[in-house]
Image (cartoon, rainbow, N blue to C red):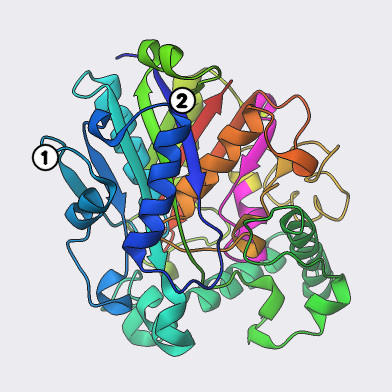
Amino acid sequence: MREVAVLGVAMTKFGVSEKTNLEMFAEAGLEAMEKSNIEPKDIQALFFGNCLGGFEEGQLHMAPFAHSELGLPTSAPAVRFECACATATVAIRHAALLVASGVYDLVLAGGTERATIMGTPLATRTFAMASQAQHEYGAGITFPGVFAMAAHMYSAKYSVPLPELKKHLAEIAVKNHRHGAMNPKAHFQKEIDVDTVLNSMLVADPLQLFDCCPFSDGAAAVVIAEAGKAKDLVDKPIYIAGMGQAACGPLYLQQDLTRVKAREEAFRQASSQAGLGPEDIDVVELHDCFTIAEVLAIESFGLYDFGKGFDAATKGETTFGGKVVVNPSGGLKAKGHPIGATGAAQVTEIVEQLRGECGERQVQGAKVGLVDTLGGDLGTVCNIILRS
């Protein structure tokens, strides 16, 4: 297998957009190619992520239309990926695998989503379709409810009183909003305090409004190349050191929700391939769809023992100057969560961090970064480790 590198990366402003999915992706894709010092004619394949275009715009089979918007050559196939919130990360992993195997030398991958146009009721319903329809979605389970159950289970399993856990979760929201306030492309760019979180409306006990990420619009794209070619195109290619993807079959009620087994396996694969462990990671962009999800993730990676990561944000260990910087972009919580684009935006942040391009939110000395994206009912997790 050949070594693979990331060249140009780009993302649109996340939030509420009047642009279509294709317009947003064209904006990100063209910028990523420009930063890679290549032209559309150089791209050999497009791996395009989108989850809910049929509900958002009545548009399916969107990949060839994105191909057309970008002006890619007819010889370059265009394939749409859908893996719930992990969509773009899975697209990037497949792109990297095909470059590593020698099928392609230069590929564009990423994703787009226009969730806000659906409104909250329809968006909530369509997001829940990523759960198991017969036993979960049909029973009224939505993702806030699942992560609320995980919070209750965590509290009981590790003997952390629920009021205490809620305060520590609020600190995660405060931390990620503080990071997002430094990110000009984040959906939310305003700091909050613990009282804001604890006084917000209840969504699914014990999770409150500010424990939850928003529905967002946005797109992100990355150019992936064979490492030798990458060195000829950009001054500072960032290398894909390891990748992992796993699936978890059991239904919610058959799982210990405090242990995301698919994530543990995906990280094991990525770290084994990279020859790196949790102690080597300087910066993480992880899937904090809800504040409790950040706790579960940092424990899954081995950054903290199980049952010990709940107060990391309170102690200042997951922000700048701490043990490991988690979600310097603001994460899903503040940067936003356009589900088809999220993974590519996470890769964009890590690549820019490893290049030292993040301004006031720069993680000093960052050399190794981890991307973690979770899709659906804890069922798909894709991890990518990048190094400078």
Q: Quadrant of residue 277?
A: top right
Q: Is residue 294 magenta?
A: yes
What segment is highlighted magenta in the picture? 279-297
- For the point 45% across and 86% down, the residue is 119
Find disc 1 in the rendering and name its residue. Answer: 74
Mark 1–mark 2 CB contact (< 8 Å)? no
Mark 1 or 2: the one toward you: 1
Amino acid beneath label 2: Ile
Q: Is residue 148 magenta?
A: no
Q: Position of residue 148 (x, y in %)?
A: 60, 74
Q: Is residue 296 left or right of residue 232?
A: right
Numbered label attached to residue 240: 2
Q: CA distance from mark 1 to mark 2?
A: 28 Å
Q: Quadrant of residue 379?
A: bottom left
In which quadrant will I find the C terminus?
top right
Please state which of residues 144 and 15 is positioned toward the viewer in this rendering: 15
Disc 1 crowd, CA 10 A, few/some/many (<14, 14-19, 20+): few
